[in-house]
Amino acid sequence: MLDIKLIREKAAEVEQKLKTKSPEVNLSAVLEMDESIRQLKTQVESLKSERNTFSKQIGELKRKGEDATEALKKVSHFGDQIQSLDAELEVQEKKLNHELAILPNLPMDDIKSSPNPEDNICLKKHGEKTQFSFPFKNHLELNEQLHLFDFERGAKITGSGWPTYRGMGARLEWALINMMLDHHIQNGFTQWMPPLLVKPEMMYASGQYPKFKDQAYEIKDKHFEFCLIPTAEVALNGLHCDEVLNAAELPLKYVAYTPCFRREAGAAGKQERGLIRTHQFNKVEMFAFTHPDKSEVVFNQFVENAEAILEKLELPYKRMLLVTGDMSFSAAKTIDIEAYLPGQEKYVEVSSISNCTDFQSRRSKIRFKEKGDKPEFVHTLNGSGLATSRLMVALLENHQNSDGSISIPKALQPYLGGLEKLAPKE
């Protein structure tokens, strides 16, 4: 959530920046509500001051043994007015909070302004597109002999977009997850195992609600209301809601593996089939709470951490700085890391790393305190480290051999009992 003081003081500048992310943004309603609320608060304070004056008079009259009836009537009248204004103030503040909650985070000043993802800037390219001396296959074609996934049975159980992993497919998925967790732990991250169900207010705190409410899976009955997490970011951010952290302990760098659940599944077509886009997928998520002065340092650590995993897996990738129109709702700066998928003949995002500045911490009321100073809002950062479904596709397609087998990168072999190749089955 944005600071209302910033909007009040720099309305035109803030609106212009927000329009680069969401062209429909108009701050007129926010400014009008803010002004109305401030006027109401002034009225309430004035009435309370007058009521206090008459209350003192009542005390004086009673001490002197004089009649205080008229003064009591005025105090009662002030009380009724204050109660009425307080009720109106509560309504107005709820409306303002809703308007603020649907505003995206401000992009940083050095982010290119464009609505077109094709304008994203390539900052780094590692490795070349994999070349084959034989007709290569996509992951679905490879699966016909490898039998790693069963999409039809997944559809039978739940529906389209809910894959099942079988045999070596399940083992390979767990190997990737464990390798990535070990990598992050070795780089100073603390591992968490959070719940997969969260309260709606946790979705709000992380910036998922109200903007993306229609993309969430909700579980409701007369006793409870929960949401399946679309990313571990929601749960990790929620760990410190309503807390004041010790500045000396920052940054707090967390990592968690969870399944993730999202309604949107993209457009139909050959480039969206199989594991490319699904309703449920596995992801190792990095998350951090930092001092504002250190958030850029931690952001760069996240990027390097994610890229190191792709290098261990011997996969070609690109580092892309997103333009304003391609950034997420909560992000002030985002870098996507895209792995090359031969079967799709394109680079596809396997990690998205964002600096959300104090946008989430304002919604979550997460602050830090240094000795003698007032509490300030922390900066939060998140990043895929990595999402396994597309990573699995990259692994299979880039490391395939002419006989349909898959060469296992050396870094991954210890997690598969030393296995060097996945061989096709008859």
Image (cartoon, helix red, strand yellow):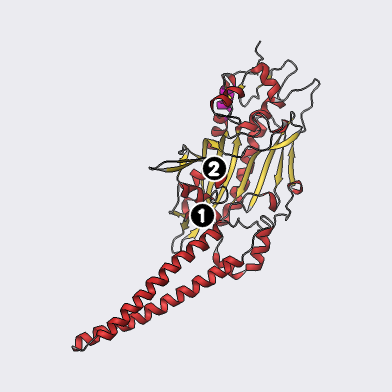
Identify which residue is drawn at 62% across, 31% down. Answer: 389
Residue sitting at the far left: 65
| 94 sits left or right of 309 in the view | left
Q: Toward the viewer: 322 or 144?
A: 144
Residue 17 image point, x, y percent? 67, 60
Residue sitting at the far right: 133
| Quadrant holding the N terminus | bottom right
| 215 sits left or right of 58 in the view | right
Compared with residue 315, is residue 212 higher up or lower down, i.e. above or below?
below
* Helix, strand or loop for disc 2: loop
* Helix, strand or loop for disc 1: helix
Q: Amino acid at mark 2?
A: Ala
Q: Is residue 155 visible?
A: yes
- Quadrant of residue 183 in the image? top right
Compared with residue 83, is residue 112 higher up or lower down, i.e. above or below?
above
Residue sitting at the far top: 426
Identify which residue is drawn at 62% across, 27% down. Answer: 411
| Quadrant holding the C terminus | top right
Q: Which residue is labeled 2 in the image?
A: 216
What is the magenta segment's predominant secondary structure?
Answer: helix
Q: Which residue is labeled 1 in the image?
A: 361
Residue 410 image point, x, y percent? 64, 24
Q: Toward the viewer: 206 or 374?
A: 206
- Alpha carbons under labels 1 and 2: distance apart: 21 Å
Compared with residue 376, is residue 384 higher up or lower down, i.e. above or below?
above
Q: Toward the viewer: 264 or 166?
A: 264
Q: Amino acid at mark 1?
A: Ser
Range of residues picked out in magenta = 169-176
Identify which residue is drawn at 63% across, 58% down. Answer: 106
Q: Are marks 1 and 2 in contact (CB under 8 Å)?
A: no
| Mark 1 or mark 2, earlier in chain | 2
| 395 sits left or right of 251 in the view | right
